[in-house]
Image (tube, rainbow, N blue to C red):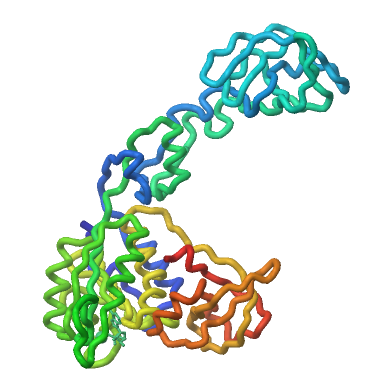
């Protein structure tokens, strides 16, 4: 389990920038310990625990990149076509015999280069006459041949510790002959919702109730990360109950997430619950939709209180929970990709905080136009289902005009 000191997130001011929050997480959170062996089939999304040096070169032997004819480049006449005697044939998986001087061997893609041969002529470019192949002028030395180790040299760092294993990493590990990989144990993340107004989906709504959506959004967001998730249900708006539940859950999890109840209202009990059980460190993040958010430590376990409004919960998840999870899980930082688009809207904002505007991206030549979702409420779930991206407006920006080039964070990288 994670073991953080109570004051590990301590910082000086009341309003924390997104950048400072990310830096606090990067600096203060130690990854969980341990290593677990998994098969390649089970490795997707996991975090590599140790550097993987290549136990063999890739490709393991020099081979042909095409179907054609292999020969020694030095046998070609400079600047003129050369006829070479055709001798030998080597297909993929076969052993090649050494090449005689001024000869060419029939060769197929993936077959080993005969000893002495260094260049391959594509069969489409070959002129065949009785027992000979004519190589046109102009082929560079080494053309169409793949030297041993051209992809990865033996002993080179193939994959660094902390790398998340996606399809390409799994393919590379397989090519290197690894049937199993040592990965960081999955961290356990517990997710609570808070609020007396919440009812679980599948249960009827009372007159002043709404269905709990955040818990399911957060569990779905976590499913893309290297974690085991635990659904911890809904907490009532009651300080003692919240404090007891957080304290009880802290021991069995590496991270606790809550949503709702972190504002300054009398019915916001999460902050007090964190303070009662451990140490609260910040609770206002300079982001919209977003703040308030609370980060604290209870019994060595980080507790992140996300805002209740569904869009704010998502934005704070991306900037706090995601880096926190990656850090705890031993993964290297994975900044979300940003692209540029042309603003299709006008917008004003306050200085000193970062804002996220939900937009649809409309193709438009080289740069898409970002069309703003018509309404701005942080509670509008359809502003996420009917948008493609967030426009990210930096702290120092005060206004956006149509035609301005803006930074977008595509939902495809997030959801
Ligand atoms: P709070 O921060 O608790 O005041 O919540 C802010 C708003 O978000 C309120 O309208 C809540 O009803 C709503 N909200 C809080 N938690 C959830 C949740 N789990 N699912 C859906 N809406 C929520
Ligand atoms: Mg609430």
Of the pair 282 and 57, the residue shown nearer to us: 57
Residue 296 rendering spot, x and y as whole percentages = 26, 73
Residue depicted at 28% across the width and 83% down the height:
262
Q: Does residue 40 sit above or below 351 in this rendering?
A: above
Q: Where is residue 329, by image quadrant?
A: bottom left
Q: Where is residue 103, by image quadrant?
A: top right
Residue depicted at 53% across the width and 88% down the height:
349
Is residue 29 left or right of 240 when viewed as pictured? right
Residue 27 rendering spot, x and y as whole percentages = 37, 62
Asked whether the viewer can see residue 81, the reply is: yes
Residue 378 rendering spot, x and y as whole percentages = 40, 84
- Quadrant for ligand 2? bottom left
Residue depicted at 41% across the width and 68% down the height:
22
Of the pair 72 and 31, the residue shown nearer to us: 72
Q: Does residue 309 sit above or below 184 in this rendering?
A: below
Is residue 155 left or right of 368 when viewed as pictured? left
């Amino acid at each position: 389990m994670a073991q953080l000191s109570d004051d590990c997130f301590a910082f000086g001011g009341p309003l924390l920038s997104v950048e400072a929050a990310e830096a606090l997480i990067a600096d203060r959170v130690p990854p969980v310990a341990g290593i677990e062996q998994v098969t390649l089939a089970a490795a997707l999304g996991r975090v590599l625990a140790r550097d993987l040096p290549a136990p063999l070169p890739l490709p393991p032997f020099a081979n042909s990149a095409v179907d054609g004819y292999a020969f020694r480049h030095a046998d070609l006449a400079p600047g003129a076509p050369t006829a070479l005697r055709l001798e030998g044939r080597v297909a993929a998986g076969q052993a090649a015999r050494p090449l005689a001087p001024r000869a060419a061997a029939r060769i197929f893609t993936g077959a080993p280069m005969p000893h002495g041969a260094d260049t391959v002529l594509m069969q489409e470019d070959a002129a065949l006459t009785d027992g000979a192949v004519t190589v046109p002028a102009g082929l560079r030395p080494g053309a169409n041949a793949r030297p041993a180790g051209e992809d990865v040299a033996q002993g080179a760092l193939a994959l660094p510790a902390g790398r998340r294993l996606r399809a390409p990493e799994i393919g590379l590990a397989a090519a290197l002959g690894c049937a199993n990989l040592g990965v960081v144990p999955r961290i356990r993340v517990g997710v609570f919702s808070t609020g007396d107004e919440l009812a679980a989906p599948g249960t009827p709504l009372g007159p002043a109730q709404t269905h709990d959506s955040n818990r399911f959004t957060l569990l779905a967001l976590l499913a893309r990360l290297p974690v085991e998730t635990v659904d911890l249900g809904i907490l009532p708006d009651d300080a003692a109950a919240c404090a007891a539940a957080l304290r009880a859950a802290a021991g069995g999890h590496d991270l606790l997430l809550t949503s709702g109840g972190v504002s300054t209202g009398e019915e916001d009990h999460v902050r007090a619950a964190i303070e009662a059980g451990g140490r609260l460190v910040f609770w206002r993040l300079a982001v919209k939709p977003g703040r308030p958010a609370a980060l604290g430590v209870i019994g060595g376990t980080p507790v992140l209180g996300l805002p209740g409004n569904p869009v704010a919960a998502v934005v704070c998840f991306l900037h706090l929970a995601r880096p926190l999870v990656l850090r705890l899980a031993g993964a290297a930082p994975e900044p979300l990709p940003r692209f540029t688009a042309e603003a299709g809207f006008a917008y004003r904002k306050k200085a000193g905080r970062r804002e996220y505007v939900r937009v649809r991206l409309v193709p438009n030549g080289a740069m898409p136009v970002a069309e703003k979702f018509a309404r701005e409420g942080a509670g509008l779930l359809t502003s996420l289902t009917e948008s493609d991206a967030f426009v990210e407006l930096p702290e120092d920006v005060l206004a956006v005009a149509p035609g301005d080039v803006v930074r977008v964070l595509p939902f495809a990288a997030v959801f």
